[in-house]
Amino acid sequence: MRRDVFQAIADPTRREIIGLLAQQPLHLNAVADQFDISRPAISKHIKILTQCGLVKIRKQGRERFCEPSYDALSEVAQWTLQYRHFWNEKLDALDQFLSKP
């Protein structure tokens, strides 16, 4: 089952995992060591991130390294862009209204 990227980033733990991997690729145990939840729970989060295309797993010897894959985030960026324009226009109009004597 292909998961939705929005579903993946809705969870704060998964967002934090993406942030960690943005700094450097990490093996699964190193990711799990950063959280106060079980390793199986971290594996489940990694699986969801992998299914939606935000994380790639690379095997190196016996280790499995997690690396970020940002292509799926472009979908989120495009979606939020429409709201950025909307709010910029509204806030500019409010600024103009409040600046009137």
Image (spheres, helix red, strand yellow):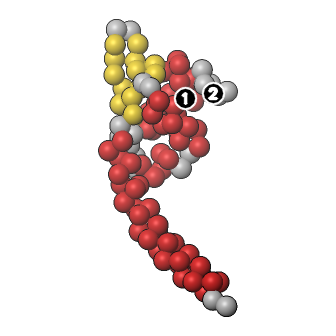
Give the left or right position of residue 44, taking residue 25 as reference.
Answer: right
Q: Residue 60: x, y in percent? A: 34, 13
Q: Which mark is residue 42?
A: 1
Tell me: residue 62, above or below residue 64: above
Classify 38 as above or below 13. Answer: above
Furthest residue toward bottom: 101
Picture quadrant where residue 39 is located: top right
Q: Are marks 2 and 1 in contact (CB under 8 Å)?
A: yes
Helix or strand or loop: what does disc 1 sit on?
Answer: helix
* Coordinates of residue 23 in the picture (x, y in percent): 47, 30
Of the pair 38 and 16, the residue shown nearer to us: 16
Task: Check disc 2 and report the residue beneath it.
Answer: 35
| Residue 51 seen by the camera | no
Q: Quadrant of the N terminus?
A: top left
Image coords of residue 36 (percent x, y): 67, 27
Three-letter code for the amino acid on which mark 2 is drawn: Phe
Amino acid found under the numbered disc labelled 1:
Ile
Give whichever of discs 2 and 1 has the lower sequence position.
2
Residue density around tag 1, few if under 14, some if 14–19, many if 20 or more, within 10 Å: many
Residue mark closest to the camera, 2 vs 1 = 2
- Taking the spot 32% from the left edge, 44% from the top edge, the residue there is 71
Q: Would you say 57 lies left or right of 92 here?
A: left
| Nearer to me, 36 or 48 | 36
